[in-house]
């Protein structure tokens, strides 16, 4: 049911995206901190919606569909804005590229395996990756508006690189698992007697 609390929490992560994006255009410290707070709140709902859906037995097809999409939209939009406003620049942009490419890869892989009724479990390393990634992005949102005596941008950049490395490792693990299932479900080759390739009979 779309109006259940878990699904509403998921939808709130999508609804907050334009607000976070819009705050990037306000060159004020309060805007950066507000965007960071909204991003952090959205990340927290990512844990609560799944927990509540299981605890209250309100898991739904639309919830399972929207949950990963909401996460990816939020992360992708924020990373793009960080690069656009030079809060993430130089070689560090590659970390963002790795994260975004992995999200596309895993999404396509999950969609394909879903057609085979095969689930892809979330590993502990993937959970750590997500946590470090979200914290790093939060630091980068604040950027130079943070306290002078704390290297906020540097902490965020290093954290994003750690997340990118874990992203690459977990993405490779998912790809290996996916390839194993793909190879096990090769379509059967048509026999020589099928239409379009008739079997030869002795003349």
Image: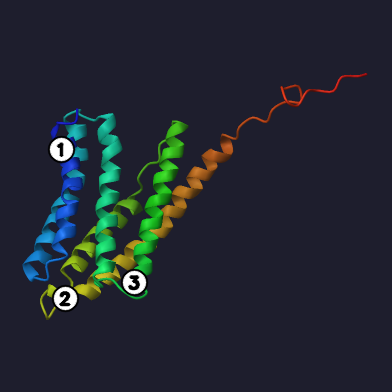
Name the foreground residue: 25 vs 41: 25
Alpha carbon separation for disc pair 2 and 1: 33 Å
Whichever of labels 2 and 1 marks the residue nearer the N terminus, that label is 1
Residue 150 higher or lower than 191, as above or below: below
Alpha carbon separation for disc pair 3 and 2: 16 Å
Q: Label 2 neighbourhood size at 10 Å, few (<14), some (14-19), many (20+)?
A: some
Task: Give residue 160's position: percent from left, percent from top.
Answer: 30, 66
Residue occupied by mark 1:
8
- For the point 24% across and 64% down, which residue is it? 136
- For the point 15% across and 65% down, which residue is it? 25
Q: Is mark 3 on a helix, strand or loop?
A: helix
For the rendered model, the colour scheme is rainbow
Task: Give residue 82's position: percent from left, percent from top.
Answer: 25, 66
The image quadrant where one finds the N terminus is top left
Whichever of labels 1 and 3 marks the residue nearer the N terminus, that label is 1
Q: Which residue sits furthest bottom?
A: 149
**Residue 190 location, quadrant:** top right
Q: Is mark 1 on a helix, strand or loop?
A: helix
Q: Are marks 2 and 1 in contact (CB under 8 Å)?
A: no
Q: Is mark 2 on a helix, strand or loop?
A: helix
Q: In the figure, is residue 9 to the left or right of 200?
A: left
Whichever of labels 3 and 2 marks the residue nearer the N terminus, that label is 3
Alpha carbon separation for disc pair 1 and 3: 34 Å
Residue 91 higher or lower than 121, as above or below: below
Residue occupied by mark 3:
92
- For the point 14% across and 55% down, which residue is it? 19
Q: In the figure, is residue 182 to the left or right of 199?
A: left
**Residue 83 seen in the current view:** yes
Q: In the figure, is residue 165 to the left or right of 72?
A: right
Residue occupied by mark 2:
144
Q: How many labels does the image show?
A: 3
């Amino acid at each position: 049911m779309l109006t259940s609390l878990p699904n509403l929490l998921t939808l709130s992560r999508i609804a907050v995206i334009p607000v976070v994006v819009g705050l990037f255009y306000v060159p004020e410290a309060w805007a950066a901190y507000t965007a960071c707070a909204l991003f952090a709140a959205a990340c927290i709902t990512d844990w609560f919606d799944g927990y509540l859906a299981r605890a209250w037995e309100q898991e739904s097809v639309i919830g399972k569909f929207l949950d990963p999409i909401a996460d990816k939209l939020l992360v992708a939009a924020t990373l793009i804005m960080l690069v656009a406003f030079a809060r993430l620049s130089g070689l560090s942009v590659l970390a963002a590229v790795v994260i975004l490419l992995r999200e596309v890869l895993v999404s396509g892989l999950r969609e394909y395996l879903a057609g085979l009724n095969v689930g892809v479990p979330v590993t502990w390393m993937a959970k750590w990756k997500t946590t470090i990634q979200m914290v790093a992005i939060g630091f980068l949102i604040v950027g130079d508006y943070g306290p002078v005596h704390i290297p906020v941008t540097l902490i965020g950049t290093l954290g994003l690189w750690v997340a990118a490395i874990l992203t690459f490792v977990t993405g490779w693990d998912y790809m290996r698992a996916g390839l194993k299932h793909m190879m096990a479900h090769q379509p059967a080759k048509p026999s020589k007697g099928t239409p379009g390739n008739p079997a030869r009979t002795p003349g």
